[in-house]
Structure formats: structure tokens, C-alpha cells
Amino acid sequence: MKTFQFLVIVVFLALASFIAYAYDPSPLQDYCVATNDTELGVFVNGNFCKDPKDVTSDDFFYPELLNPLDIDNQLGFNAIFVFVDKFPGLNTLGISLAYAEFAPRGVAPPHIHPRGSEIIIVLEGTIFIGFVVSDQNNNTFFYKVLGRGDVFLIPIAQVHFAYNIGNTTATALVAYNSQNPGVTVISNAIFGSNPPINPYILAKAFQLNIDVIEYLQSGF
């Protein structure tokens, strides 16, 4: 019996370790400001790290995140993603953020963040937001209409979108539990891949006429 309990504990700890490694690594020092200079980088933890003696307050500062964005485009949407590539001080800290603006009827198209969960807070306007979970959970669609101050959570790697249902510009602040959660827009990945996916495959998969698929691919 004791042997069995010991094996259960070992398996549990092994699984816990595996789950832990599925997310950003735990930092091994107080900070690890990312640098592209591999000759001067002295530690490695996600990215090469700047030598601590060269770190300044500016490495932990990002200016004017809430500046207006250009939303005069096909989607009526724009966002600035502040990941580790733009904010080196985020390296190894397991966090990042974004600021988004929506024109009236603007949409953040269906997309995923493959390496991070997301939490969004609406600053102004009214946004309809939702995500669809996997086949394992019957492709259930969870959604809400968010107003100023409302918060919504998107679990890691789930397909989601946001749509401004109001008549004024909407803005939102987004936080992620990864220094580099990534962004994959579904339509871009499917119809704008490089090289293109064979249109016969997509026509079969989406049960559409191949002319429709080729038209969608031509847009990219």
C-alpha cells in the first residue's frame, strides 16, 4: 500500500512539473531584460539577458500606451501588442499587455494566442466578445456584452473575437500571462498562408465552392 502511495505521489509530481513547463519559465533572477546582443548577454532565460550592470529604469518603462490608433481600415480595428520584443523588461516575468481600439462596428477577427490566457477590461464603449472551446467540450460558445469597467477572460489558445456593437469608438486594455503569447488570426492563417494551402483541400474542409476559396485566398 505504501509503495502504491509513493508511486502516486511520484506520478503527481511528474505531471505537475510537466504542466509547469507548459507556460513561461520561472525567473531565476530578479529581472532579465531581453537583449539581441548575444555577445553581451550573460544569462539565458527565455531570451538572452542584458548584463545587470547595464540595466536602467528605461528598461522597465513603456511610454504612451493609450495613444489613439488608426482604425480607418477594413476591420475598423487596431491594437498595439506590448510583448517582450517591444518591451524587453518583460522577459521571464510571464506577463504582457495590449491596447485595442474599435470603430463603430469594428471587429477584432477570430484569432488565438497560442501561449497565453487573456483578460480584457473595457475602458470605453460597448463590446460583444466571445470564445469557442474545443471539440472536447462540444465547441461551446461563451460570450458577453461588455461595458465600461467590465472584465472578461479568454483561456489559453481558444478561438475568440471582439466586436464593437456601439455607435462610438470603443477601447480596451488586455493583459496576458506570457511575455510572448503570440497572435494567430484564423482567416490569415487559413487563407493567407505562405505558400497557399491547396484550395481543393479548403473547399472540401469548409464545404464551399472552390471559386469561393480562391476568391478568399486572392485577398491575401
Image (spheres, rainbow, N blue to C red):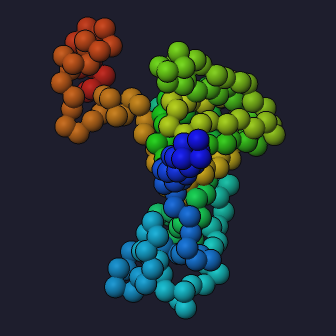
Q: Residue at x 75, y 30 (%)?
A: 146
Q: Residue at x 56, y 30 (%)?
A: 161
Which percent across, then down, holds residue 207?
31, 8
Which percent across, then down, holds residue 87?
54, 66
Quarter where residue 59 is shown? bottom right
Residue 29 drawn above or below residue 215: below
Front residue of 35 and 215: 35
Quarter where residue 198 is shown? top left
Which percent across, then down, holds residue 66?
68, 55
- Residue 40 shows in the view: yes
Q: Residue at x 21, y 32 (%)?
A: 196
Left or right: 81 as drawn, with respect to 144: left
Residue 102 drawn above or below residue 128: below
**Outermost residue, front side:** 1
Left or right: 113 as drawn, with respect to 41: right
Quadrant, the N terminus: top right
Q: Residue at x 69, y 29 (%)?
A: 127
Residue 155 drawn above or below residue 19: above
Which percent across, then down, holds residue 202?
26, 19
**Outermost residue, bottom side:** 53
- Residue 69 shows in the view: no
